[in-house]
Amino acid sequence: MAAKLPKDAFEYYVSLGDGRSYQAVARHFAVTKRAVTNRARKEEWQQRVAEIEAKARQGAEQRLAEALEDMNGRHIKSLRIVQARALEALRDMPLQTAMEAVRALDVAIRQERLIRGEPSDRTAIQVEDVIRREYSRWLTVEGDDAEEAGNG
């Protein structure tokens, strides 16, 4: 084994992934393991690989965080559409048939709270408050005050 270890030996070493070893590099380039070990020590292969892997993990984590953020954004937009439609249905329906809209609004609010990391167990009270507020707003007739609309 009189061959000399080429300059791109480190790149080959890194490309071996989980199966990387100095012996595998030595076999590939037809050199002694001692030649690979000496070069690796001199060029700090172990430290360089650790830095490359750390950067790769950071990049992967960043991409995952961005993907999760994008997904949450899409879900929140969808939930807002459901909420808007549920509120429209509540406004347009008689009180007796509005329960589907109430359920849709409740589900949308719970999901939005979960996505935003908020507890969802308080939503029943919030839905009730939203419904009361929206009904009082919608039942107000132009030119009449809120009390007359409630009695009419």
Image: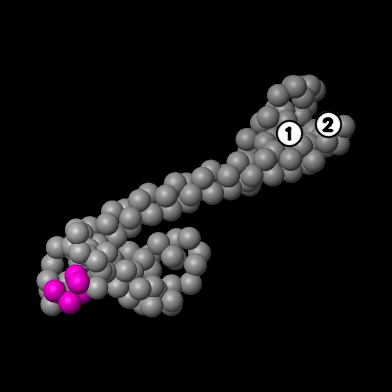
Can residue 107 be spotted in the picture? no
Disc 1 crowd rating (10 Å Cα; few below 14, some 14-19, many 20+) is many
Q: Which mark is residue 136?
A: none
Give the quadrant of the C terminus: bottom left
Circle 2 SS class: helix
Residue 7, position as x, y percentages in the image: 75, 22
12 or 124: which is nearer to us?
124
Give the quadrant of the N terminus: top right
Alpha carbon separation for disc pair 1 and 2: 16 Å
Disc 2 crowd rating (10 Å Cα; few below 14, some 14-19, many 20+) is few
Sequence-wise, which precedes: disc 1 or disc 2? Answer: 1
Can residue 85 be spotted in the picture? yes
Q: Which residue is mark 2?
A: 43
**Label total for image:** 2
Residue 120, position as x, y percentages in the image: 43, 72
Q: Is residue 151 magenta?
A: yes
Question: Is residue 120 rendered to the left or right of residue 138?
Answer: right
Question: Is residue 91 rendered to the left or right of residue 16?
Answer: left
Amino acid type of disc 1? Ala
| Chief SS of the magenta region | helix
Circle 1 SS class: helix
